[in-house]
Amino acid sequence: MSEINLLFVRHGEAAESWGNHPDPYLSELGIKQSASLINNAMLKSLDTYNFVSSPKSRAKMTAEPLIKKFNKALIINDAYSEIPSDDIDNSQKKAWLTDIMNTKIRDLPDSVVNWRNNIINNSLNISHNTIVFTHFMVINALVGSLLKNNSLMYFFPNYVSVTKITIENKEVKSISLGDEKKTIINL
């Protein structure tokens, strides 16, 4: 079997915080950040890639410049959506996420464990080069799992950073983390 390259792109900056709006669009800066993907050296040759996105607006908007450049259809996959938090009050989301980020995998709520497992299963079963437009915690859940981290949090991918995972025979061959920047998560 040949190598499969998976590129995970964190969405650009959102116009509103996650704790205040369930599905914010990109901010003006986020739109500029997504436009910059056209010049990203890792993304110069995507003609043979499938384009997949979280259903969230900020992820889909981040994909738009590359969709236009490569004339691609965008496949929406719920597996790459935000960490499940619908049952958490907006005023508590920041504290909840901070706690969840550092909770041991064995102690996570079932909804988060299922979300994480769905990301891993979907990613390891991709059979074609694919670029995925997604979220901070999705990328962390996947990379942390593949590197056998004992919590969800592994690193701080910057806006529109690209994390590359190469898979061969459903085994991870290499991982190249995207640009990292310690930023305040916009809750």
Image (tube, rainbow, N blue to C red):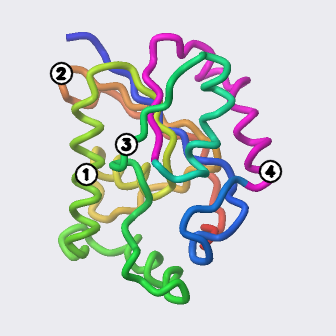
Q: Give the mark nearest the N terminus, 3 or 1.
A: 3
Residue under circle 2? 169
Q: Give the mark nearest the N terminus, 4 or 3.
A: 4
Q: Which residue is pictured at 75% across the width and 34% down the height?
A: 35
Apparent side of residue 41 relative to residue 33 in the rendered image (left or right): left
Where on the picture, by quarter, is residue 67? top right
Q: Give the mark nearest the N terminus, 2 or 1.
A: 1
Rounded to the nearest whole Å, what is the CA distance between mark 4 and mark 3? 25 Å
Residue under circle 4? 29
Verify whether residue 30 appears in magenta.
Answer: yes
Rounded to the nearest whole Å, what is the CA distance between mark 1 and mark 4? 34 Å
Q: Give the mark nearest the N terminus, 3 or 2.
A: 3
Where on the picture, by quarter, is residue 25? bottom right
Amino acid tagged 3: Asn
Verify whether residue 154 appears in magenta.
Answer: no
Q: Which residues are magenta?
A: 27-54
Amino acid tagged 4: Leu
10 Å crowding of disc 3: few (<14), some (14-19), many (20+): some
Residue depth check, mark 4 versus mark 2: number of the one nearer the observer: 4
